[in-house]
Every structure is written in structure tokens, then in C-alpha cells.
Image (spheres, rainbow, N blue to C red):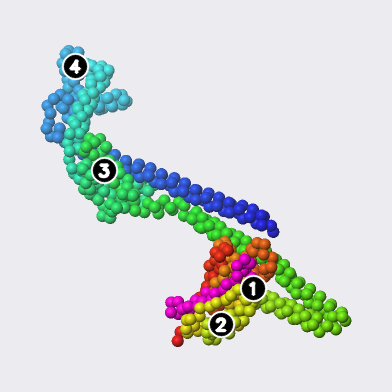
Amino acid sequence: MKKSTIWFLAITMVITFVGLLFTQFVYMENMIKMRNEQFTEAVRRSLSDVSRELEREETQKYLQEGLELDIVSGDNDVVGEIFLQPQLSIKSPDGAIKVYPFDELKKYTKSLKQPSGSPSTLTRPSQLSASILDVYRNMEDMLHFQYEYQRKLIDRVIINILGEAASRPILERVDTLRLKEYVKVALENNGLNLPFELAVIDNKGKVVYHSQDYNPAIANNLLFSQIIFSNDPPGRRNTLRVYFPTKNDYLFDSVRFIIPSFIFTFIMLVTFTFTLIIVFRQKKLTDMKNDFINNMTHEFKTPISTISLAAQMLNDSAMTKSPQMMQHISGVINDETRRLRLQVEKVLQMSMFDRQKAQLKLHEVDVNDLIAGVMSTFKIKVEKFGGSIDADLAAEDMVIAADDMHFTNVIFNLLDNAVKYRREDVPLSLFISTRIIADDKVEISIRDNGIGIKKDDLKKIFDKFYRVSTGNRHDVKGFGLGLAYVHKIIKDHNGDIRAESELNEGSTFIITLPLIKK
């Protein structure tokens, strides 16, 4: 599959997942917002109902007190008499006035609807001096008098409420024992059945009453306020404050079913991302393996061609007659055979990458002695290119648990890379040093003055099959396995390796290994 196709599928799936997550998030946010608006409206409606109920209760109280006061005082005006003892005066044709109690008059009007011969407490209409129209007109006047009296009575009650109620302390106007019940009933009537806490604030901003678990710190964030008696003067108004400790739970109840869907979608996105990373790694690994096969083919082709040519020369009888030529040909065959064997060994060394851990034969190894042995062998190759190799191995008791064969290969590989990536215009200079750090670790430093490594490549040089670009350098061959092998062996020895480099200034490889404690 082409890399562009993988990128297209990846971008499409990422956009799809992100869009799905965004849609779910927006839906959940809108649901919570709508639920919160409904909750707020229901609470405000409930508190408004409570305020009206308290106003109605106070008005009823003052009205009852006003009626009882007027009845006890016994006003002697005409309106009062009519209200206390309803009656009707009817004038006869001879000018005489007869007074009928209102209850008796109602019985009379009822008798008009009864069949003829029914008993009646009043005389028939013919015996009355006034007509039926006059009777009803007088009844209407009497009802008007009663209305005027009660209107004046209610006016006096309202004046008392406006003049006296607003000046009284709020706790005298509100029954705190019944207040919480009023709020609870109002909330239930508006579809809210959840715990709440309340407080009453007087006109000076002081809390004069609060429920048992009222917490001002929590109330500041979840508070709902309502003026208790809205008709009071602005400077004397009292406030009812209510908050709901479980408000957030109430709001999220409506979207809890979305949360699992959101989580599953997020897990799918993470899984897809992880899968995508693996695909790209596999793609990169495939490209590296293809490069490895191409390099390996080239590396094997050259010595095989040389050996084949030498073999053909041996078939020539003229060549066999010259001992010097025979020695030269045999030397060529021997060198190329050794070169092939080294390449095969490098490939075989990488077979351990398929295992979780290499099979190491550990025993006590003196780091300084091992490095000194490698330097004596490698010195000839360095001097061949006009270079030098020096060391500072002054530290003592540098004993580690290591597989000497693999660890020797590690040092050889690092020194061989320094020779490969040397600068042509500067004599090669290698320096190896050892020192003890943290009293229980040994640090081995191998520094060269070669072409260096770019910062972008430093992060990848220990990856299998990865090879740093060498520009126009065509004499540097390899499989990209050397540093990967070094990294794995050091890790299997419970150590660590890192590289420091500056382009055109050289590189330093630093190995840290645990010492054997005495």
C-alpha cells in the first residue's frame, strides 16, 4: 500500500472520530444547558409561588383581625347596622312604612316560585303596598350598602398592611417552621423533588434564619434568591435564598447515558491511533528491510565476484607458474572470504533481536583490560588511515558482569564506525576513557573527530536497519545493524548508552554499566 493511501485513510478516520466526539460533546453540553435552564425556571417559579403564598397568608391574617375589630367596636352608622342586621323598609299606599328582616324577605321571594296554596310567611303581593320591582330595587340598594361597607373595611386592612407589616421584623411575619414546607410543596408542584437548604436574609443583609445544613460557601455558587414580600418598600425588603447541594447530579442524570458512548468512541480513537502508529512503523520497517536486502546483496556480490575472478585466474596455467601470483591470488581469496564471514556474522548477530533477551554468558570482566585488548588490535587499522587512538584508563576496580565476546563486539563496532565516518581532511583521532560514577556504575566514553551526526538522526541511530545519510560518501557500506546490536547488548547487560554529536565536529558514545559490588 502506498504511503499516500495510508495517510489519506488515516486523516479521514481521524476527522470522522474527532467529528463524532465533537458532536457527542456538543449534544451533551446542550442537554445540560437545557436541563439547567428548565431547572432554573422551575425553581424561580416555585419561589415566586412561595412568596405569593406568604403574602396571601399575611393578607388573610390582617383581614381577619380587621373584621373582628370592627364587629367588636360596633359602629352605629347606617352601613354598619345594615351589615350586622340586614333588613328592608317598604312603604304602603297609605304612607305607612313597614320593616321586613332580610331573611324573611328571602323566604317571601322564594314563595313566589311555589305553587298556589303553599304556605308563606309573608302576605301575598296584593297585600303589599309596593310592587315586586320596588322590592328588588330596595334589595339592590341594601347590597350596595353592604359592598361599600366591606370595601371600606378592606381599604382599612390594606392601609394597616402597608403601614405596619413592612416595619415589623421578618421573623414575626413569616413562620419559619412552615417556610421549608411551603418551599418543598412548591418545588414538588413544579416537578422538582430534591434536597435543598434555605436562609432568610433581612433588609440589612443579615441572615436571620437558615436551615440546619445551610453552608454559605456552597450557597454562593448554587444560589437562588426571591424577595419574600415584593410590595414592601425597597429599603425594607427581605430575601429568601435557596440552594440545592445535589444540583449537579440532577443535571447530569439527563446525560449519563451519553457518557459510555463518549468513552467507547474515545477508546476507539485511541485504538485507531495506536494501530495507525503500528502501521507506519511496519511501513518504515519494511522500507528498512528492503534497503537491508539491497545493501546485503551489494555487500555479498563484491566479494563473491572477486573470489570468482580469482578462481578463474587459478585455472590459467600461466598464473600457476608464478609463486608470487599464486600467493597474491590466495591472499585475495582469503581476504574476501573473511569479509564474507564477517558480513554473515553480523546478520546472524541480529537473530537475537527476535528473542526477548540474548543468551549471555556472564562472568567477571575488567573493563580496562578488555578495552586495552581491543585497542591493541584496532590500533593497526587506525594508523593505516594516519590516525591515532588514546585512552585514559586510570580508574581501578572496574569489574562488571559481562559476556566478553558480545561486549568486545560492542567496542569494536563503535571504533569501526568512527573509522568509517572519519573526515578525509582531518587526521582521525580516537579517545577512550573510563570512570566510576555514583560509586556503583562505570562510564565508558568513546570520542572521535569524525563527520558527526545530525540532531534529527541522533534519535534514530539505535533503530534496527536505520542508516545515517552520508551525502557523497560512497565508500561507506553497511546494513544499519551495528548500532542496533550495540544498543541491545548494552540493555541486556542492564546498562545504558547514549550519543552526543555535533555536525563536522565529531561524536561521543557514552556507555553506563553497573559495577560488581565487593
Q: CA distance from mark 1 to mark 2?
A: 20 Å
Determine contact: label 1, label 2, CB under 8 Å. no
**In the drawing, what numbered circle is on residue 385?**
1
Point 19% across, 13% down: residue: 93
- Can you say which quadrant of the picture contains the C terminus? bottom left
| Mark 1 residue type | Phe
Q: Which residue is mark 2?
A: 372
- Residue 175: in sight, yes or no? no
The nearer-to-camera label among 3 and 4 is 3
Determine contact: label 3, label 1, CB under 8 Å. no
Q: Which residue is mark 4?
A: 91
Which of the two discs, 3 and 4, labels the residue nearer the N terminus? Answer: 4
Point 15% across, 16% down: residue: 96
SS at badge 4: strand
**In the drawing, what numbered circle is on residue 131?**
none
In x, y percent, where is residue 438?
A: 43, 77
The nearer-to-camera label among 3 and 2 is 2
The one of 357 and 517 positioned closer to us in this rendering: 517
Q: CA distance from mark 3 to mark 2?
A: 91 Å
The one of 488 and 222 positioned closer to us in this rendering: 488
